[in-house]
Amino acid sequence: MSLPMPVPTTARQPLWYKDAVIYQLHVKTFADSNGDGIGDFRGLSSKLNYLADLGVTCLWLLPMYPSPFRDDGYDIADYYSIHPSYGTLDDFREFLEAAHTRRLQVVTELVLNHTSDQHTWFKEARMSRNNPRRDWYVWSDTDDKYRGVRIIFIDTERSNWAWAPESKAYYWHRFFSHQPDLNYDNPAVREEMWNVMRFWLGLGVDGFRVDAVPYLIEREGTSCENLPETHDVVKFLRANLAEHFPDRMLLADANQPPELVRPYFSEGDEFHMAFHFPLMTRMFMAVRLEDRKPLVEVIERTPEIPETCQWGIFLRNHDELTLEMVSDVERAYMIDEYARDPASRIYLGIRRRLAPLLDGDRRRIELMNGLLMSMPGSPIIYYGDEIGMGDNIYLGDRNGVRTPMQWNGGWNAGFSTADPERLAQPQISNHQFCYQARKGESQTRADHSLLNWMRRLISVRQSTAVFSRGTTTFLMPANHRVLAYLRSLGREQVLCVYNLSNSAQAVELDLQSLAGAVPIEMFGRSLFPRIGELPYMLTLEPYAFFWFRLRRL
Ligand code: GLC
Ligand code: CA
């Protein structure tokens, strides 16, 4: 495979991903340039100013490769090109260059665990038992190997084995049965995946969100998750990356408790970043319970990670709000509070966007985003959540949170000139969240729009490295409806105080160790009374929060 010409890039700062604000988007539903109803790279390129103005620094694209789209692109049929509906490799190169010119890094999807059953590798492998590709996938004569391994897509799959009639054998799949798992015991598979990485890195891609990491290797008598051999595969890929592209980033999608995600950072020689799934759930729990306990607990339970590593933190993404890794009690509570309508549930989670989960309540949307932008990690915004977009829980699978971006009050909300019935997904028409009510470009003009508030939030966050690199220390005021923590980096300190409740709160903070410092509220730059020896008293309106930079004499 000859490598394409690289796209020139702005210099990547060392550890750039630690200071990143990431924006996750779907090319398919972002902007359609040629009127066929499907978003594409030219459309996306035309919206880069919007993204740069928002203040995000990195884009994460959902899978953009040729695919039969039975899992919205996570079923890849060819790792070396672009889905024709999205454009050509040249369109992608132009997009990448345009993004880099605006200092936006680009992270793409690396789906290691499985391919589509339409991939030629699998079409060959399934034909006969002695096909040279046979050993690229995981086969068995019976369907009783690896008994007890959990099924992830419990609404659609009954087994992790599926039958291939051509060669009369079962193949292993952790996700949909049309997504056969690759066999990472076969060194040729690892080598090929490194080739795939090299291809995109050679073009100039800044990193990968690595899909479904825990499931790469299977062993009898285990859960087939997080096995030592899986870590070996990751180490192999990282070592290659370190040698050839040391400034690029790998982000692990490992939906596991923090203790089991920690090994994926290893000694700084596996992943640079990993999602923090339980922190996401606990943010939603804390505002519903009106109590800081779930958040303090999860952060205290989170192990230290190496200097060069970073958590990826988020409120929502393209999947259901997952409740796989929480206790039964927590799951029941979340379902009760956030998913009364059974149609909003799927697998072990909730298929809703941020704004509808919070009843469109601007105060809670701001509070949750305030948490997202100040807790330890690099924040990830899911496209549309910056304008409070709605969802459609009746669209099937997880499509209801993947509807077209709402740009303006025009035809198809400015997403496409196609006839509405041709759109990749229908627009949201629910009157609270429809595009007449929530749209990107019009919010640009309205001073008090959520979009402009988000911009301000991001720019305040990015005005200091304390949020991205600092330590976190909780204060434990008697009022447990208030969450307060100090972020510190060198001499710099920021105090964050959140009212998690729906009623006004007063709180007395023990700030003795900071006596003499003057808190400066970071959004309006107003000075607050100097901290003395006595408890520091603050009052907060429902769901209000403060970020104070502490100025010392
Ligand atoms: C990950 C993706 C999800 C996909 C699955 C299978 O969990 O986030 O969207 O369906 O992997 O590839
Ligand atoms: Ca198009």
Image: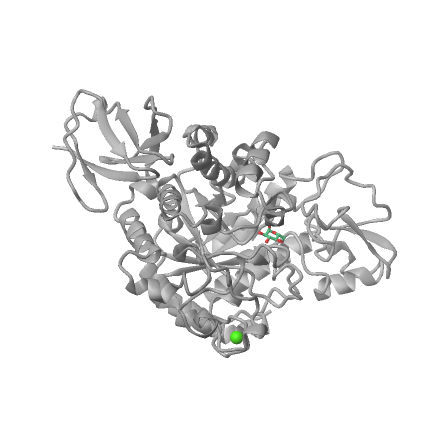
Image height of 533 relative to 548, above or below: above
- Decide which of 19, 325 is in the foreground and name it: 325
- Decide which of 133, 355 is in the foreground and name it: 355
Residue 3 % position (x, y)? 53, 69
Image height of 387 relative to 320, above or below: below
Counting the numbered discs, the total is 0
Image height of 535 relative to 341, above or below: above
Q: Horizontally, is 490 left or right of 189 in the view? A: left
Residue 486 % position (x, y)? 30, 32
Q: Is residue 357 visible?
A: yes
Single out the residue that lies furthest toward the front.
Answer: 431
- Quarter of the picture containing the C terminus is top left
- Decide which of 12, 262 is in the foreground and name it: 262
- Decide which of 317, 93 is in the foreground and name it: 317
Image height of 332 relative to 10, above or below: above
Report which quarter residue 76 is drawn in: bottom right
Q: Is residue 100 visible?
A: no
Report which quarter residue 46 is drawn in: bottom left
**How was this image coloured?**
one colour
Residue visible at 27% across and 48% down?
A: 460
- Quarter of the picture containing the N terminus is bottom right
Report which quarter residue 101 is drawn in: bottom left
Residue 416 % position (x, y)? 48, 74
Residue visible at 31% across and 39% down?
A: 544
Residue 504 % position (x, y)? 31, 33
